[in-house]
Image (spheres, rainbow, N blue to C red):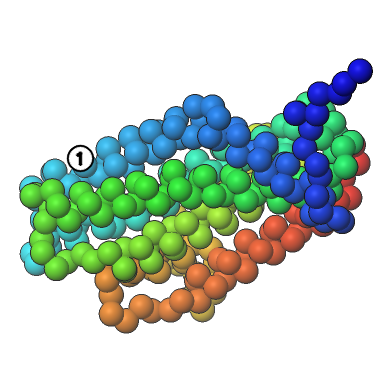
Amino acid sequence: MTTNTQQLNRVNGQNWSAGLGNLSRMEVAKWVKSRQGLIHLGLWMLIINGLMAIIISTAGEELEAGQTIVSASIEPFIGITSWFTAIGVSVVAMGAIVGEKRSGIAAWILSAPVSRTSYFTSKFVVIGFFSVITMVVIPGLIVFAELSFIPSGAEVGEISILPWIASVGALALNVVFYLSLTLFLGTVLSSRGAVVGIPIGFVFAGMFLGGVLPEGIAQLTPWAVVSPLAMELAEGAKDVTSYVPAISSAVWSVSLIGASIWRFNREEF
């Protein structure tokens, strides 16, 4: 009698990393072996690049003194991208932990020789990577092309690739923060509505509080990574006010990830 082992994968790693490779491949398959990745990319190109195409094509009609199509289009790009992607990644991740806990899938997966840290890490890394690529990087580079090469928006010398990439990096940090927040809430709450509602509420809070907080405090909030940091970088400012928002946003994200792993390892199934 022979045994078919083609579907079996050897689990490598000990302690926290046990099963990380297999779990990561399973998460990646959700994006690349189905239509999910293409659907997400198409959706975000439609939202961000579609809206920006409209803005760029109409920006020349109401320019203020000294303003160009490029300069008039940068603020809408930062606002549209940061707002929609923060909400979007929260929606994408809201069921990653809660949904599988409630359905029993998490308990079933964790009955195998895999660690809870690997389970959480695989979700964070894979969702984060594909969300950043589809929501920020590709649409952001397309907008750069729109501003650089479309005749109606090609003011030579106004926009350069390195500052733009740095701005896209700041917007990616924004996505990572909201992903970290959503996954953390998934480890402490059992309601999908609360898991997605709190990050969305946090987005709106930033719209109202970001401009009224004392500067020293505002620089330490995740909101500052969008404005002023991403805005200044996209505009190619020679003197960026401060890189503290990038550091603080990264610290907030790492702290939320650490708290998520700590909490998830104490979850009862």
- Report helix, strand or loop for mark 1: helix
- x then y, percent, for residue 236: 27, 71
Identify the residue at horizontal 76%, vertical 59% (top origin).
259
In the image, 218 versus 3, the foreground residue is: 3
Residue type at numbered disc 1:
Ile
Quick check: 42 left or right of 125? left
> Where residue 253 sits in the image (x, y, percent)?
62, 61
What residue appears at the point 80 percent right and 42 percent down from the top-left corner?
10
Q: Position of residue 145 (x, y in %)?
A: 22, 51
Q: Write the residue at 89% across / 50% down.
A: 266
Q: Who's the residue at 74% across and 61% down the image? A: 258
Task: Answer whether residue 28 is visible to the viewer in this image.
Answer: yes
Q: Observer-nearest residue: 104 or 126? A: 126
Q: Residues within 10 Å of mark 1 (few under 14, many from 20)?
A: few
Q: Which residue is mark 1?
A: 54
Q: Quadrant of residue 254?
A: bottom right
Question: Is residue 40 depicted above or below 178 in this figure?
Answer: above
Return the residue found at the far bottom: 239
Outermost residue on the top side: it is 1
Q: How many marks?
A: 1
Question: Residue 53: x percent and y percent?
Answer: 21, 42
Question: Is 66 above or below relative to 257?
Answer: below
Q: Nearer the viewer, residue 123 or 240?
A: 123
Q: Which quadrant of the figure contains the N terminus?
A: top right
